[in-house]
Amino acid sequence: MTLLIYGCHPLAIGRKEKQKSFLSYALQVFRNGLLINNQLDRLVRTAEEERDFNRKFSAFVNHKNAIMMVKLMEDGIQHIERNAHGGLLFADISFKMVKLLKLKA
C-alpha cells in the first residue's frame, strides 16, 4: 500500500495538464486492451514495445471492469479540472484501480 502512495507522488506534484494527459493515456491503454481481447489488434496504433505492454495488460481488462475503469479515469480528469488535490486524487484512483484489476471476466 505504501508503494502505491509513493508511486502517486510524481503525478501528484505535476501540472494539471500532465495529470490529465496521464489519465487520458490510461484510457487509451484500456481501449487497446479491449481491442486486443476482441481480436481487433489491427486497430491498435502504437509503437511495437508499447503494443507488447498492451498485449500483456489486456489480460486484466475485461467486460466486468472496463466500463468502471473508464469512468474512474474520466472522473479523475473532471476532478483535476475542478482543482482536486493531486495526491489524494491519484491515491484514490490507485486504490480503486487495484480492486478493478482483480475482477475476473
Image (cartoon, helix red, strand yellow):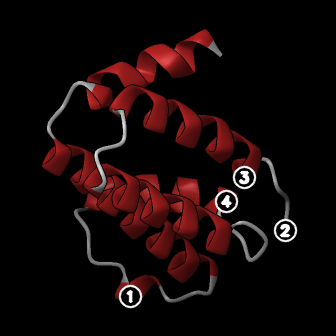
Q: In which quarter of the image is residue 68?
A: bottom right
Q: Look at the image and tell me in which quarter the C terminus lies.
A: bottom right
Q: What residue type is labelled 1?
A: Arg
Circle nearer the N terminus (4, 2): 4
Give the Cα separation between the discs numbered 3 and 2: 11 Å
For label 1, the residue is 42
Callout in the foreground (1, 2): 2
Q: Seen in the image, is 34 located left or right of residue 64?
A: left
Give the Cα separation between the discs numbered 1 and 4: 18 Å
| Image location of residue 59, percent across then percent down | 67, 59
For label 4, the residue is 59
| Mark carried by residue 105 | 2
Q: What residue type is labelled 3?
A: Leu
Give the Cα separation between the discs numbered 4 and 2: 10 Å
**SS class, disc 4:** helix
Q: What residue appears at the point 70 percent right and 50 percent down from the top-left corner?
A: 101
Q: Seen in the image, is 27 located left or right of residue 104?
A: left
Give the Cα separation between the discs numbered 1 and 2: 23 Å
Are the residues tagged 1 and 4 within 8 Å (C-beta)? no
Q: What residue type is labelled 2?
A: Ala
Are the residues tagged 3 and 2 within 8 Å (C-beta)? no
Q: What residue appears at the point 36 percent right and 33 percent down from the top-left corner?
A: 85
For label 3, the residue is 100
